[in-house]
Amino acid sequence: MTEASKPSAVSVEAVAALDIGGTKTAAAIVTRQGKVVDRVTAATPGRTGASAVLDTAAGLVGQLMAKSAGTAVRALGVGSAGVIDSRTGRVLSATDVLTGWAGTDLRGTLHQRLGLPVTVINDVHAHALGEARHGIAAGCETVLFIAVGTGIGASFVVGGTVLAGAHSAAGHAGHQSSPYAGSLPCTCGGQGHLEAIASGPGLANEYARRTGQPVDDLRSVAALAEDGDETAREIILLGGAAVGSAVGGLVNMLDPDAVVIGGGVTGLGELWWQALRDAVKRETLPSLDDVPVLASALGSHAPLLGAASLAWEALA
């Protein structure tokens, strides 16, 4: 067989995706159809500084690209913690969980290191896009996504596009006043915000306040509830009701086709979910009673698929 007649290697087109969070960074290779071909994760060295976080992120993508023989990786989509200017790919602000993250030029730095076109968006917006384009809310014109975890964030997707806001800061659902929070201090410096009472750390802190017994995290509260601790059960019900009340108010304002709830706190189970759904119904207008409140179906794949979809979009 001559050199010219040898069959060429089959090349599958794909993009890379990154989900950079405060504790974990994930990378994936994703097809145009939204199939995750390969995925790797690593701890985010958030306290070490922006350079270390970028080293980890670029290293994960490089690792996947090296393994993906026969796959043409054409671009990189990034979902990142922090307020992100998606036009420039720069981090406008971030919490202390990622030391020195504010001001980081994600697009420019990752392009320089990996040689790929790069698109960047906030991680909650990326999660929302994943569910709206490939997940439980696919086919819906308008989707309200709420992430309940270490913090509480939101995203509103209209026609497959995130409404990021005039200052790229839309979606801070955890930083609205909540009647359940009283005057509790919030991580943003304010008081009485939803995140102070209904986030994972907020619920763990509330258990300690009520009992005088500090717990490691929300998983400890969930375990105590399973063992019959009545205070732990009350805390879980409180968390669901607080989030549900806020979601009901947002439904009244936005009138979405569907609400999707994701994040680690949703793992508290049916007790939390029922409290949330009951509170949504108490809060919403009668004409909005049939707006479905759905659990995120894609889990940790969602932000990767959302970021990847933006990378494909930029290539079009």
Image (cartoon, rainbow, N blue to C red):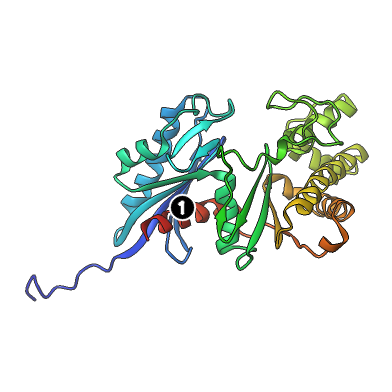
Residue 157 to residue 107: above or below: below
The N terminus sits in image quarter: bottom left
Residue type marked 1: Arg
Q: Is residue 58 left or right of residue 238?
A: left
**Please, what secondary structure does the residue beneath circle 1 have?**
strand
Q: Residue at x 36, y 52 (%)?
A: 75
Which of the two residues, 313 or 234, is positioned nearer the viewer here? 313
The image shows residue 300 at horizontal and vertical percentages of: 58, 51
Residue 178 to residue 159: above or below: above
> Which residue position holds label 1?
39
The image shows residue 112 at horizontal and vertical percentages of: 30, 38
Q: Residue at x 44, y 43 (%)?
A: 87
The image shows residue 204 at horizontal and vertical percentages of: 78, 33
Residue 240 to residue 47: above or below: below
Farthest-out residue, right: 230
For residue 38, which quarter of the picture? Answer: bottom left
Q: Is residue 55 left or right of residue 152?
A: left
Which of the two residues, 309 or 264, is positioned nearer the viewer here? 309
The image shows residue 260 at horizontal and vertical percentages of: 69, 56
Farthest-out residue, front: 166
Which of the two residues, 306 or 31, is positioned nearer the viewer here? 306
> Dot 1: within a 10 Å radius of its alpha carbon, few (fewer than 14), some, or many (20 or more) residues?
some
For residue 291, which quarter of the picture? Answer: bottom right
The C terminus sits in image quarter: bottom left
